[in-house]
Image (tube, helix red, strand yellow):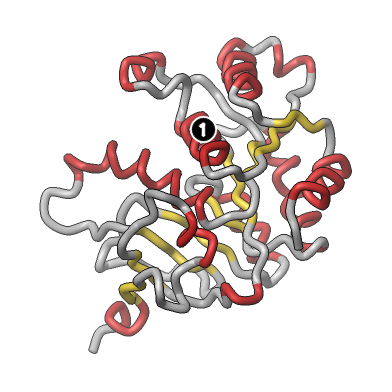
């Protein structure tokens, strides 16, 4: 038996490997594929982090502070789709993390034993033609399995997405889903120099207008999380 056969499993809503919060959303996946299942969901307080594929030095530094503070407060595991920095910081503190993928390949590599990978799709057949839709679907899983969503930085990267109903980016779609599921959403207010950058300013305004709560620093975030998340 290959290593991959031992590490990937199919999880249904009744399975212990299926995140409990995800069972509550109306469009929950009927099946999840879990690669390297390590999370004890019965003793967890998952928090989702959304970033951008091209983070500024400011957001990289901020991400490290946020993840450390979340772990210290017991808000873990960290759940994310594209924020590799957040997962790396989790690994640094010997904490587990969850990476939600559009699809899981049968040739997945384990780059760290403390990372669990989750998707509702397998990368088989003509999966590339369906990837754009799966990227959007992935966002509901990220926020659906988490108690709250934290947006560190977002950018308007592709105006063409407007025609598909996505106002700025995948993060915006994740925020809309989080509000639909009644999950609290927090976004860090960028410093003034970054607010003068058009793609960052526009994304920030769109996400705030979608009812994300702005926070100024990590201490304020932790305080608001304590109020919003029942532990």
Q: Which residue is mark 1?
A: 176
Q: Is residue 168 left or right of residue 101?
A: right
Please tell me whether residue 229 is drawn above or below residue 175 in the rendered image. below
Please tell me whether residue 134 is drawn above or below residue 44 in the rendered image. above
Q: How many marks?
A: 1
Q: Residue furthest bottom?
A: 1
Camera-side residue of 158 and 118: 118
Q: Is residue 224 left or right of residue 172?
A: right
Q: Quadrant of the C terminus?
A: bottom right
Q: Is residue 193 left or right of residue 172?
A: right
| Residue lying at 63% horizontally and 64% vertically, measured from the top left | 77
| Residue lying at 54% horizontally and 51% vertically, measured from the top left | 80
Please tell me whether residue 213 is drawn above or below residue 77 in the rendered image. above
Q: Residue 134: percent from the left, percent from the top? A: 30, 44
Mark 1 lies on a secondary structure that is helix
Q: Residue 101: percent from the left, percent from the top? A: 39, 53
Which of the 4 image quadrants contains residue 121? bottom left
Which of the 4 image quadrants contains residue 74? bottom right
Q: Quadrant of the N terminus?
A: bottom left
**Mark 1 crowd level (few <14, some 14–19, many ≥20, 10 Å Cα):** many
Q: Residue 153: percent from the left, percent from the top? A: 63, 31
| Residue lying at 59% horizontally and 43% vertically, measured from the top left | 182
Q: Residue furthest left?
A: 125
Q: Is residue 178 left or right of residue 58?
A: left
| Residue lying at 40% horizontally and 14% vertically, measured from the top left | 159
């Amino acid at each position: 038996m290959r290593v991959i056969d031992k590490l990937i499993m199919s999880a249904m809503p009744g399975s212990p490997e299926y995140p409990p919060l995800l069972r509550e959303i109306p469009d929950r996946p009927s099946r999840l594929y879990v690669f390297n299942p390590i999370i004890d969901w019965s003793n967890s307080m998952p928090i989702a982090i959304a970033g951008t594929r091209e983070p500024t030095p400011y957001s990289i530094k901020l991400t490290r502070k946020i993840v450390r503070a979340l772990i210290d407060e017991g808000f873990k595991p960290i759940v994310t789709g594209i924020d590799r920095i957040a997962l790396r910081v989790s690994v640094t503190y010997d904490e587990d993390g969850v990476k939600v993928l559009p699809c899981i390949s049968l040739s997945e590599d384990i780059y760290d034993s403390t990372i669990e990978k989750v998707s509702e799709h397998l990368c088989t057949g003509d999966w590339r033609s369906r990837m754009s839709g799966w990227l959007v679907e992935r966002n509901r899983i990220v926020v659906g399995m988490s108690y709250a969503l934290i947006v560190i930085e977002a950018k308007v990267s592709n105006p063409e997405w407007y025609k598909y109903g996505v106002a700025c980016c995948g993060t915006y779609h994740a925020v809309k889903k989080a509000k639909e599921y009644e999950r609290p959403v927090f976004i860090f207010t960028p410093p003034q120099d970054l607010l003068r950058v058009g793609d960052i300013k526009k994304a920030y305004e769109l996400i705030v207008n979608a009812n994300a709560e702005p926070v100024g620093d990590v201490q304020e975030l932790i305080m608001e999380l304590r109020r919003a998340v029942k532990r």
